């Protein structure tokens, strides 16, 4: 397995991953359509994404997992933290250390930037909860909320 930065030239690999993800589990709630592809492609040219870190796990030349995060500076307490937006592994590649490898690489990159806290919302499904409870040096606390801005 190899961990690589998600760059624009790897977008076809990610599209392939997303399509295979939906073949294995069909509950994702959004389609991999032209708008999705355009939005992801455009984010590589949008300054708002300059503080995003997105990594891909490759196995035999194919993406089997991805992790996406963003660095968040806050004037609340003058700290810089990171937010884990997404971590996902193909069902057929789970329980093989892919998610842990992605998380480990992300933490190493954050540490290089002087960031010592990674915050995540956790998916409600049992498999995700089990994964997050097994993450070393972490505790589950607080409750997440999604607020739609309309």
Image (cartoon, helix red, strand yellow):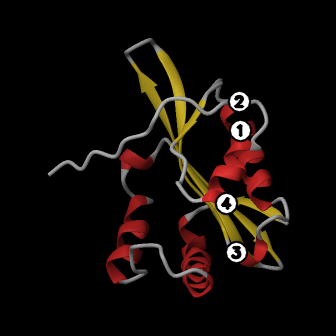
Asked if the residue under mark 1 is in contact with the one under mark 4, i.e. CB atoms within 8 Å, the reply is no
> What residue is shown at x 75% (from left), y 37% (from top)?
108
Q: Which residue is mark 4?
A: 127
Instruction: Residue under label 1, please give it.
Output: 107
Place of residue 33 in the rendered image (x, y in percent of width and height, measured from the top left): 38, 83
- Labelled pair 1, 2 in contact (Cβ < 8 Å): yes
| Label 4: how many Cα within 10 Å (few below 14, some 14–19, many 20+) | few
85 to the left or right of 43? right
Name the residue that disc number 2 marks.
111
Report how far apart the C-alphas of labels 3 and 4 lie in the structure: 10 Å
Q: How many C-alpha atoms fall within 10 Å of the one at disc 3: few (<14), some, or many (≥20)?
A: some
Image coordinates for residue 104, horizontal then vertical, percent: 77, 44
Give me the C-alpha separation between circle 2 and circle 3. Answer: 29 Å
State the separation of the CA atoms marked 2 and 4. 27 Å
Residue labelled with disc 3: 91
The answer to whether mark 2 and mark 3 are in CB contact below 8 A is no
Q: Nearer the viewer, mark 1 or mark 3?
A: 3
SS assignment at label 2: helix
Task: Decide which of 25, 97 is in the foreground and name it.
Answer: 25
* Residue 77 in sight from this viewpoint: yes
Q: Earlier in the sequence, mark 4 or mark 1?
A: 1
Q: Quadrant of the N terminus?
A: bottom right
Of tags 3 and 4, the one toward the viewer is: 4
Which residue is outermost to the front? Answer: 126
Image check: 84 left or right of 58? left
Label 4 – label 1 distance at C-alpha? 21 Å
Residue at 45% x, 59% y: name it: 44
Point out the tag, 2 or 3, that comes first from the N-terminus.
3
């Amino acid at each position: 397995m190899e961990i690589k930065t998600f760059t624009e030239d790897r977008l076809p690999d990610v599209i392939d991953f997303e399509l295979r993800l939906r073949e294995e589990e069909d509950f994702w709630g959004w389609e991999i359509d032209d708008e999705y592809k355009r939005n992801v492609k455009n984010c590589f040219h949008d300054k708002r994404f300059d503080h995003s870190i997105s990594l891909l796990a490759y196995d035999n030349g194919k993406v089997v997992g991805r992790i996406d995060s963003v660095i968040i500076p806050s004037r609340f307490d003058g700290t810089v933290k990171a937010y884990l937006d997404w971590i996902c592994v193909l069902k057929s590649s789970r329980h093989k250390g892919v998610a842990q490898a992605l998380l480990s690489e992300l933490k190493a990159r954050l540490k290089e930037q002087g960031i010592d806290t990674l915050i995540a919302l956790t998916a409600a499904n049992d498999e995700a909860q089990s994964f997050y409870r097994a993450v070393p040096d972490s505790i589950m606390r607080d409750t997440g909320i999604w607020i739609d801005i309309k």
